Image: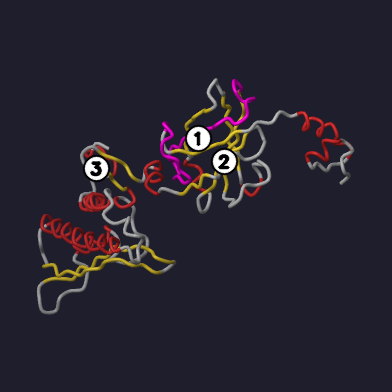
Amino acid sequence: MKKSIFEFGDKFGVESPFEDWEREKDLAKKEYYAAVAEWYSDRECKNRVSESKIGVKVYCKLIAVSANLFGKSVRIDFLYGTNKRAPSHMSPMKEGNKVLSKTIAFGPSKEVVFEFEIPLSWKDLPNGLHIWCRIEEQGFISMPLIVEYDPYIIAIRKGDIVYSCNCGSIDTTHAFIKSNRGLNHIGLDNLWKQVLNETSVKSKGRDGFKVKYTQDARIIKNVFVGATSSFFVKHGLSINYKERIAVAILMKVSMAFEEVQEAGVIIGKGDSAFEPADLVSNLLGLYSRMRPELTKEVIFKKCNA
């Protein structure tokens, strides 16, 4: 690479082939702006933030430092990606980064505040992401906003958690997803099959059979931790009694499992225990197994979801 023969080449530290001199002259003539970007959680800009969650609205306040910004419209570029440092340029192809641009008009005031919603589609980026801001392809004017995942917001947007007027929040992954682990004591389907068909181990000395039921969570690849209980159920009960027994077993094991999570030692930090949708979703899920006519659509209608 040849050193530029033009004075601005030395001034701006530009090294390029001689034939790039037209581009360098344009660079030298470019009008530069100075501004600062700050992130807030509220439109009034009272609560400044450096971290946010996927799907959450944040507010960016631009503060003009140079007078040449007053009364002008300028393009603001937001770079987002998983880089730990701001990259050297705003290339959307660099290390998976992408650019979102907005045109911002400065009025007589030196400050402009605008809403910025972190799109749900960014959830596909691993380990959260960082957002940087720069003005008119110049230098970065903000510290990066660090964005993490909020599993509840994602679940609501995806339709995994649905609010209903009559039943509260319903977690469809609790209520309607079947277990595929091949264990007869895991899953609501298997709980009801054991009670209904009396298929488990028969008692040798008494007139009944054993029902075993487990709720757990994966800790690592093939390791699960949770709550398991076994119950003795009498043979030949009516369907009505069997339904009541299945509900009682579900409630007992569900409470035990939530208490395991609440300890926050092995499963999470205790923040996943007794989530608003958990227990009611378990119950609705069992109802749908005991009464096949209670499909997902029927339950949503009855719950006014």
Please identify, in this view, whether the residue under mark 3 or under mark 2 is nearer the observer: 2
The answer to whether residue 135 is left or right of residue 217 is right
**The label number, if any, that marks residue 142 in the structure image:** 2
> x, y percentage for residue 67?
62, 25
Magenta stretch: give its range.
Answer: 43-72
Q: CA distance from mark 1 to mark 2?
A: 10 Å
Q: Is residue 276 above or below residue 115?
A: below
| Identity, as a three-letter code, of the amino acid under mark 1 | Cys
Residue indicated by mark 1? 60
Q: Is residue 223 above or below residue 268?
A: below
Q: Earlier in the sequence, mark 3 or mark 2?
A: 2
Q: Which residue occupies the extreme bottom position in the image?
A: 205
Q: Nearer the viewer, residue 34 or 240?
A: 34
The answer to whether residue 89 is left or right of residue 288 is right
**The label number, if any, that marks residue 168 in the structure image:** 3
Q: CA distance from mark 3 to mark 2?
A: 41 Å
Q: Helix or strand or loop: what does disc 3 sit on?
A: strand
Q: Quadrant of residue 33?
A: top right
> x, y percentage for residue 74?
62, 27
| Identity, as a three-letter code, of the amino acid under mark 2 | Ser
Q: CA distance from mark 3 to mark 1?
A: 34 Å
